[in-house]
Image (tube, rainbow, N blue to C red):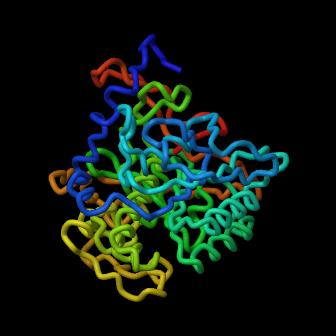
Amino acid sequence: MAVGGIAPAAAAQDIGSQQWYLEGMQANDMWKVSKGKGITVAVIDTGVDASLPELRGHVLKGKDASNAPTDPHKDATGHGTNMAALIAGNGAGGGVRGLAPEARILPVKVVGDPRADAPDPLMARAIKFAVDHGSRILNVSFGTITGQRENFAKSQSAVNYALKKGALVFAAVGNNGDKDNLPGYPASLPGVVGVGAIDRKGGMAKFSTHGDSVGLVALGDEIAGRCEKDLDQTCISGGTSQATAITSASAALIWSKHPKWTGNQVLRVMMQTAAKPKTGDIPSSYLGYGSVRPRKVLLDGEGNPGPANTNPLLAREGATKPKPSESASKAAGDAEQPPASDEQAAKKPAAEAKASDDGGNTTLWVALGAGVVVVAGAAVAFTVVRRRGGTMARP
């Protein structure tokens, strides 16, 4: 829906030119080293439209994990398709250029009838299917934003299974940071790498949910892609969904370059080379271990993979406490945020974390989604369509 009479622009001409973050991340140089070849990324989401030019030949058969399955290559909302394109799109036909353009996508659809598909067993089935069908990386820009951890026993068991099989699970923490800051699942489950979002200036995106679930952050604001309601149009969106896709793609690049590493080793170097918060605890409740920088591994050769069988997230490797001279307020606010690139050093204090209610036993299955703006013409004139709405609030 375009608001205010602004017509969306055709996607085929300029999506790639609007993907400003690829230059900042030095994607062209990284692609000389790795493009994600040999890595399968499961996109646990709303399905993936495999007919898009930039995704043709990249999308595997997949599955709908719900009790009333439909075609996993059909995507009624476009959300899963955009996540897949951000990961593995090759830019064909003027479409989206993914950060890992030679990775393969396994679509695992999790849009079930809430009367027949409770979130916990549905997510558990999706995770297990993804692992059993060769996915080393699971991208979960989907989940529920209310509930209690004990209500996700099946999902936790599936996560444990994935970790035992050597896979990595990245999940969006949600877009409630500027509202009720409710925890998201599966992002809040032990072993899952919860991903938050930073903005174009390198500061924490105000909508990004914060708390103990944040393991890493990535760029998740002003991201160009296809409009979810019309994949032939270009939209600018933002949220932890997009940040998660960029993080999953970063892992794919590293793992493709170092195929003998375990998932633990890939994650360890990602944590080591992330741009760290300058003040406060690490992991930070806002920024986790910092913002992902795959170029530090691929181009600069940084990062020590360390032990193959120790999960660095569960072991809290690299965790630190603030110096005594640092005030509690700075520690809570992460006064200096990591830059999105070396040229960006903007500082943006984060708001003080608010106490949140876990919502009792109620669970609401949602696509953790994005705010969307529709691009008008070749210019950057746009209007906000929505940040979040109803039960389909995509980070």
Q: Is residue 63 above or below residue 80?
A: below
Can you see residue 211? no
Q: Nearer the viewer, residue 1 or 22?
A: 22
Q: Residue furthest top?
A: 5
Can you see residue 244? yes
Residue at point 48%, 55% (across, down): 104
Q: Position of residue 110 (x, y in %)?
A: 68, 50
Q: Position of residue 50 (x, y in %)?
A: 55, 41
Q: Nearer the viewer, residue 261 or 368?
A: 261
Q: Is residue 311 above or below residue 97?
A: below
Q: Position of residue 115 (x, y in %)?
A: 84, 46
Q: Position of residue 123 (x, y in %)?
A: 69, 59
Residue at point 21%, 73% (across, down): 301
Q: Is residue 78 above or below residue 7?
A: below
Q: Nearer the viewer, residue 240 or 131?
A: 131
Q: Is residue 75 left or right of residue 217?
A: right
